[in-house]
Image (spheres, rainbow, N blue to C red):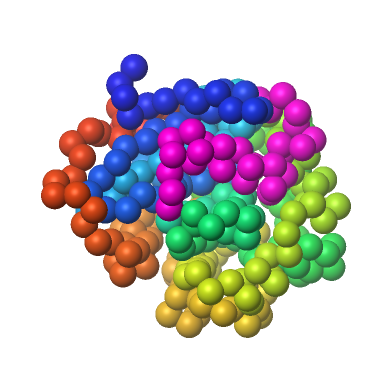
């Protein structure tokens, strides 16, 4: 196995990830519900071309990682954040910029609230919601697709319907990403939603109103899950460019549907932190073909 692809043993089981250092700071990429690290293929390439280090993992119960041994505890925002922190510990990582999509954004917010190693955070397809049921019902749009988010068992038709809604339509749902939906531990969906509805995790609204570290919020204007008006309500303390960055014509997975436009935002956000850390960028590639996607 090449040295950039790792299987790391943590408290909940084995985690599959790719990790490569660069001449610029490290960026951690956290995927969404019923997905996998390969959803960030375009971002990994763009970051590496600019010399950034990259760490992208399959969350417990997703992709090539093992299902959690203690699902009710791990499959929650703080549970996932704790596993990510263990991985940072494993590699002795002292600082990291975080990019989180959907569930990954919630994990990123949780991690920012508990771990000083987070330097900045960019979230996409994620509302910074209060930990109350009435806030959750306002932050998320009601839809049939939304009902799938916490459904334990998927029929073949359910997997296709949810996958298409998440990535922006059938033309964006590759066989590899559909396989990731089907592979996901049903307990991961079930317990994530149950724990969220039960208020497990920090108050993200409060966090973004008091947190001084830079935060970027990106939203696709066709997102079937997230209420844009809710994203604009918090009095963010340090919101990048002073407003939510809206990408026209794309849905929940803006980084997947419109990678060039998203990457332009991502690299602009990272630019103030992009000092050269070593004379030359690392030459190790991030990964080979994984689930049919070239890294």
* x 73%, y 59%: residue: 202
The extreme left residue here reads: 279
Q: Main secondary structure of the magenta part?
A: helix
Measured as percent of width and height from the top left, residue 203 is found at 73, 64
Left or right side of 221 for 276: left
* x 32%, y 37%: residue: 20
Q: Give the position of the C terminus as an image quadrant.
A: top left
* x 68%, y 65%: residue: 204
Residue interval drawn in magenta: 67-95
Left or right side of 66 for 203: right
84 drawn magenta: yes
Residue 221 visible: yes
In this view, 237 is above or below 226: below
Examine the image and state in which quarter residue 162 appears. Answer: top right
Left or right side of 281 for 233: right
Measured as percent of width and height from the top left, residue 132 is found at 83, 64
In this view, 21 is above or below 233: above
In this view, 197 is above or below 72: below
Measured as percent of width and height from the top left, residue 186 is found at 72, 31
* x 79%, y 52%: residue: 200
1 drawn magenta: no
């Amino acid at each position: 196995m090449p040295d950039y692809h790792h299987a790391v043993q943590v408290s909940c089981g084995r985690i599959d990830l790719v990790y490569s250092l660069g001449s610029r700071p490290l960026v951690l990429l956290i995927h969404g519900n019923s997905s996998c690290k390969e959803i960030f293929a375009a971002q990994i390439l763009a970051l590496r071309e600019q010399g950034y280090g990259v760490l992208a993992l399959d969350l417990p119960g997703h992709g090539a990682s093992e299902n959690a041994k203690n699902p009710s505890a791990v499959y929650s925002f703080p549970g996932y954040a704790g596993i990510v922190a263990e991985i940072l510990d494993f590699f002795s990582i002292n600082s990291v910029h975080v990019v989180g999509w959907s569930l990954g954004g919630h994990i990123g917010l949780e991690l920012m609230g508990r771990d000083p190693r987070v330097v900045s955070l960019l979230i996409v397809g994620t509302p910074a919601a209060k930990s109350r049921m009435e806030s959750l019902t306002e932050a998320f749009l009601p839809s049939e697709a939304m009902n799938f988010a916490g459904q334990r068992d998927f029929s073949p038709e359910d997997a296709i319907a949810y996958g298409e809604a998440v990535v922006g339509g059938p033309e964006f749902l590759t066989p590899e990403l559909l396989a990731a939906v089907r592979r996901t531990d049903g307990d991961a969906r079930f317990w994530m939603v149950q724990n969220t509805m039960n208020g497990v995790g920090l108050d993200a609204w409060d966090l973004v109103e008091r947190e001084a570290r830079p935060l970027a919020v990106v939203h696709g204007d066709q997102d079937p899950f997230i209420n844009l008006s809710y994203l604009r309500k918090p009095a963010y303390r340090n919101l990048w460019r002073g407003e939510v960055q809206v990408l026209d014509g794309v849905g929940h997975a803006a980084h997947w549907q419109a990678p060039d436009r998203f990457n332009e935002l991502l690299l602009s956000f990272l630019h103030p932190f992009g000092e050269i850390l070593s004379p030359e960028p690392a030459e190790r590639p991030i990964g080979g073909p994984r689930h049919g996607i070239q890294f």
